[in-house]
Image (tube, rainbow, N blue to C red):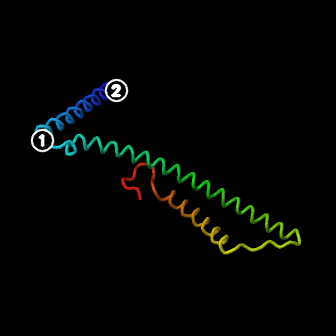
Amino acid sequence: INTFLKAEADLDYIEKRLKLDFINSSAENGCPAENNLAVVLENLKAIKSKHSALCSQVKELTSAQKESVDSIRNNLSSVMELLQHFEQTTDMEVETLTESERESVALLSAVSCTTAEVSSTKPLDGTSSIVD
């Protein structure tokens, strides 16, 4: 275990030393700060961290959206069943769905399917380097 701790400490020292060397050599060569390799590497770390956080947020939002769509679809299905039951047990006839209502039902089904496909096919755990 001590060997691993020493190796880790050595690697930390080497990393800090390389950063210092990059900063010093860039300053000596008159390179602007944005061209400094150490600064670029730090910016890259920050971007990777933000990317990982965004991936987690997208995963949470996708899950919440799927739950919401599923809930709406289940409630709509229950209402449709109640209307059918009401129509069968009474002499009253329930009006058929309007074109707009039928489009809404179709859209809701399509959104639910699309959400399920996206959440099952895209890795949103930060392992992908590109987010569509």
The secondary element bearing badge 1 is classed as loop
Between 54 and 121, the one nearer to me in the picture: 54
Relative to 113, is 25 above or below? above
Residue at x 89% of width, y 72% of height: 91
Identify whether 67 is placed above or below 3: below
Percent x, y of residue 17: 20, 32
Residue 58 lies, in percent from the top left, at: 48, 51
Residue 1 is marked as: 2
The residue mark sitting in front, 1 or 2, is: 1
| Residue at (65% x, 68% y) in the render | 105
Q: Which quarter of the rendered picture does the N terminus lie within?
A: top left
Estimate the x, y position of residue 56 in percent, counting from the top left. 47, 47
In the displayed structure image, the side of residue 14 where residue 25 appears, left or right: left
In the rendered image, the quadrant that contains the C terminus is bottom left
Q: Is 58 left, or right, of 83 in this rendering?
A: left
Label 2 sits on what residue type?
Ile
Q: Secondary structure at mark 2?
A: loop
Q: Quadrant of residue 3?
A: top left
Q: Residues within 10 Å of mark 2 (few under 14, many from 20)?
A: few
Residue 30 - label: 1
Q: Position of residue 108 (x, y in %)?
A: 61, 65
Q: Determine the image quadrant of residue 21.
A: top left
In front: 128, or 70? 70
Residue in view at x 25 percent, y 44 percent: 40
Left/right placement of residue 38 relative to residue 128 reads left
Q: Is residue 3 above or below residue 60?
A: above
Q: Neighbour class for label 1 at 10 Å: few (<14), some, many (≥20)?
A: few
Which of these two is toward me, 35 or 38?
Answer: 35
Looking at the rendering, which quadrant does residue 130 occupy?
bottom left
Spatial CA distance of label 1 from label 2 is 44 Å
Q: Amino acid at mark 1?
A: Gly
Going from the N terminus, do you reach mark 1 or mark 2 first?
Answer: 2
